[in-house]
Amino acid sequence: MSKLVTIFGGSGFVGRYVAERMAKKGWRVRVAVRRPNEALFVRQYGAVGQVEPVLCNIRDDASVLAAAAGADAVVNCVGILSEVGKNKFQEVQAFGSARVARVSSEQGVMNFVQISAIGANEDSSSNYARTKALGEASVLKYFPEATILRPSIIFGAEDQFFNRFAQMATLSPFLPLVGANTKFQPYMLGM
């Protein structure tokens, strides 16, 4: 039987590419998401039954346990770019990553990949960068051999970053430049 990977946030911009690539490599893929009915499109990435979206709330141990059960590997793609409603950086990127790592470790998962961000730093004045670093630390506590990826801006056909700039460019010849000293190394998905 082929190996099973659980991808938390597997219907998001990065997660969907990870899910598709893992399915093409022959893995069974469990896509753990808040709203599985909005993630049905991931099923087309593999043969019938190979890729399945499942309900998961990373704020709940039992929910994470059900999603991670039996997985050989876990990829945590959960992250937010801004705080809206109950989605706060601390809850999602620090506590959520810690819960996913702890429960995955308790379930005997062998391999763990954490999608973090360039500039992740526990001493950062940016809540985004600080909570990404706290998430990394939690992952390494439970998975010392984890792979942690720190991409900069990731763009592609469905991104919300460069496409927003393209839309703004149609409205004005001037574009904002925030954080001019910030490291910037864009990566394109889908090519």
Image (tube, helix red, strand yellow):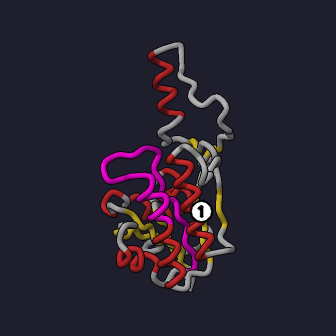
What residue sits 52% from the left and 80% below the top? Answer: 71
Where residue 173 sits: x, y (%)?
53, 13
Q: Nearer the viewer, residue 56 or 49?
A: 56
Tell me where residue 146 sits by quadrant. bottom right
Instruction: Classify 121 as above or below 142.
Output: above
Magenta-tinted stretch: 72-97
Q: Is residue 96 visible?
A: yes
Judge from the rendering whether residue 1 lies leftward or rightward of residue 37; answer left or right. right
Where residue 156 sits: x, y (%)?
56, 42
What residue sits 47% from the left and 31% below the top? Answer: 164
Q: Is residue 47 visible?
A: no
Tell me where residue 162 sits by quadrant. top right
What residue sits 52% from the left and 73% below the top? Answer: 101
Where residue 56 sits: x, y (%)?
36, 69
Tell me where residue 147 sits by quadrant. bottom right
Judge from the rendering whether residue 52 lies leftward or rightward of residue 104; answer left or right. left
